[in-house]
Image: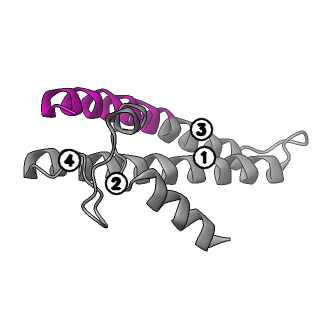
Amino acid sequence: MEPERARSLLTAERALLRRSLAEVGTAQVEDRQAEQETGDVADPALSLEAQGIDDAVAAELRDRLAAIDRAVQRVQDGTFGRSVRSGALIPDDRLEADPAAELTVEEAEADQGSAR
């Protein structure tokens, strides 16, 4: 994949992730404010569940943003499109689908198989 195409994909995804993270941050604040409200209809368990979901989503978004940042660094270093483990080429179609891909499909599948 050409470096400019990679930068374009990564920049677009980074912007989307940052917007999503801001939205989740707003939801986190709202959930925590709702927890502080008193009333006989408020179920504190629902508020805690919503907070847990928001926190998990925010963590996933931050992890993905970190992966995007690592991919941008690989573009700058000239190593984008190669496995961070083996140095093998990652096919362009995989990079189009996931521009932050760090492993070949085979390596990623092997990791999933060993995690079971």
Q: Residue at x 90, y 42 (%)?
A: 40
Q: Which residue is mark 2?
A: 102
Residue underneath mark 4: 80
Distance Cα–Cα, label 2 vs label 1: 27 Å
Q: Nearer the viewer, mark 2 or mark 1?
A: 2
Which amino acid, mark 2? Glu
Name the residue type under label 4: Phe
Q: Which residues are magenta?
A: 1-23
Classify mark 4: helix, strand or loop. Answer: loop
Q: Position of residue 28 (x, y in %)?
A: 56, 44
Mark 3 lies on residue: 30
Of the residues under marks 2 and 4, which one precedes in the sequence?
A: 4
The kind of residue tagged 1 is Asp
Q: Could you give the CA–CA distance between mark 3 and mark 4, rounded to whole angstroms?
A: 39 Å
Spatial separation of the CA atoms under disc 2 and disc 4: 9 Å
> What residue is shown at x 58% (from left), y 63% (from top)?
112
SS assignment at label 3: helix
Q: Earlier in the sequence, mark 1 or mark 3?
A: 3
Q: Residue at horizontal 38%, vertical 56%?
A: 103
Residue that numbered label 1 is attached to: 54
For this view, does 87 lie left or right of residue 38? left
Give the quarter of the figure containing the N terminus.
top left
Q: Which numbered disc, 3 or 4, marks the residue that appears first in the sequence?
A: 3
CA separation in Å, label 1 and label 3? 10 Å
Q: Nearer the viewer, residue 21 or 43?
A: 21
**Amino acid bearing label 3:** Glu
For image coordinates 27% across by 50% down, the residue present is 89
Seen in the picture, residue 82 relative to 111 is either above or below; the reply is: above
Q: Nearer the viewer, residue 45 or 109?
A: 109
- x, y percent for residue 41: 90, 39
